[in-house]
Amino acid sequence: MSDTTADPTSQRVFIDKQSPKAYHALVETAEAARSVATEAGLNRTLVELINLRVSQINGCAYCLSLHTRAALRAGETALRLGVLAAWRDTELFTARERAALALAEATTEPANTVAQEDAYAAAREVLTDDEISAVIWVAITINAFNRVSILSKHPVRAIPQQ
């Protein structure tokens, strides 16, 4: 019997490394989702907002770290990132972004059918069918990556200042 009190992650399997074939299939799915998003006209900042909001809901520190940096590189502001968890309570997001965020949340918590129907109805008012599909695919793929990272306990380390 090993003592895991000092480092509870020592017993975790990095499933992306343990089963690379499955992980690479997930990466390919995410690449296809990003391509669909681009073709539908979703800009990179909106895709990253979706990735971040879903990762907030799921509590995935690794994906939050990764996608915060990606959002900043894409031109997102620190203010909007800072209030993303409370996006409904601000005037900082457009109707299109609000619809996409609500739909991403509904995709993340599909058992909440009332929220799902409300989100879908709101999305129908401002998003095209292609955009709705792209938002859902982006949310599905980040949900999957969240689970990979959470269950593997991927570490979040400080990044040296450059």
Image: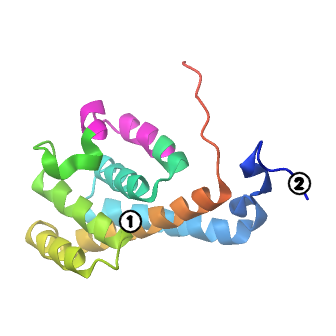
Q: Position of residue 74 (x, y in %)?
A: 35, 39
Image point 38% across, 50% down: which residue? 52
Establish if 39 lies above or below 53. Answer: below
Q: Relative to residue 19, is residue 157 drawn left or right?
A: left
Q: Which residue, given by chain and number where applicable, does mark 2 sit on?
A: 2
Establish if 161 lies above or below 75. Answer: above
Residue 47 lies in the magenta-colored region: no
Amino acid type of disc 1? Ala
Q: How would you classify the magenta stretch by its main secondary structure?
A: helix
Element assignment for label 1: helix
Question: What residue range appears in magenta?
Answer: 66-82
- Tell me which numbered mark, 1 or 2, is placed earlier along the sequence: 2
Residue 80 lies in the magenta-colored region: yes
Image point 12% across, 70% down: which residue? 122
Q: Position of residue 7 (x, y in %)?
A: 76, 44
Q: Which residue, given by chain and number where applicable, does mark 1 sit on?
A: 139
